[in-house]
Amino acid sequence: MPNPAKKTHTKIPTGPNDPGKKKHKDKARWVAAEEAAIITTLLTQKAAGNASESGFKPTVWSFVVQAVAGATMDGSKKDALQCKTCYHHVSFLFLFLSFLGF
C-alpha cells in the first residue's frame, strides 16, 4: 500500500509536440490600409447600432475580418482576434496622442 505522506510527482510533457501547449501565431504586420479598414468598418457598425458601452457585438468582427481581407495586399489572412488586438493598439495610441495634445 502506498504511503499517503509521500508525494509523487508526475512529469508534465513540455516538448514542442506537447498537445497541452497553445500554438502561437506569428505576429501580424499591419499596413495603414488595413488599419483604416478596421476603423472605417467599426465606425460604420457603431452608426448602425452594433456597439454598446462595453464594446462591439461579436458579429461585427466578422465584417472587420472581411474588410481587412479586402485591404490586404500581401495575401496574409488575419483573424478576428488579430483585428481586435490591432484595434486596441490603434485606439490606445489615439487616446495617448490626444492626451498629449496632438
Image (tube, rainbow, N blue to C red):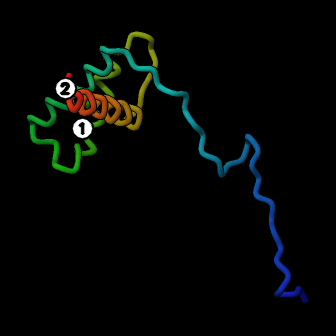
Q: Report x, y in % for residue 24.
A: 57, 37
Which residue position is annotated with label 2?
Answer: 101
Type of amino acid under label 1:
Val
Q: Which residue is situated farthest in the front direction here?
A: 100
- In the image, 80 versus 90, the foreground residue is 90
* Residue 48 visible in image: yes
Do labels 2 and 1 touch, CB within 8 Å?
no
* Residue 40 visible in image: no
Q: Which residue is situated farthest in the right direction here?
A: 1
Label 1 element class? helix
Indicate left or right for 58 with 79 as reference.
Answer: left
Type of amino acid under label 2:
Gly
Res 84 quadrant in image: top left
The residue sitting at 44% across, 23% down in the picture is: 77
Q: Report x, y in % for residue 11.
A: 80, 60
Q: Report x, y in % for residue 48.
A: 9, 36
The residue sitting at 85% across, 81% down in the picture is: 6
The residue sitting at 76% across, 58% down in the picture is: 12
Q: Nearer the viewer, mark 2 or mark 1?
A: 2
Report the Cα–Cα distance between label 2 and label 1: 31 Å
Label 2 element class? loop
Which residue position is annotated with label 1?
Answer: 60
Indicate left or right for 62 with 11 as reference.
Answer: left
Q: Report x, y in % for residue 44.
A: 14, 29
Q: Which residue is situated farthest in the top direction here?
A: 73
Res 33 quadrant in image: top left
Quarter of the image with the C terminus in it: top left
Q: Earlier in the sequence, mark 2 or mark 1?
A: 1
The residue sitting at 20% across, 29% down in the picture is: 98
- Neighbor class of circle 2 (other Cα within 10 Å; few <14, some 14-19, many 20+) is few
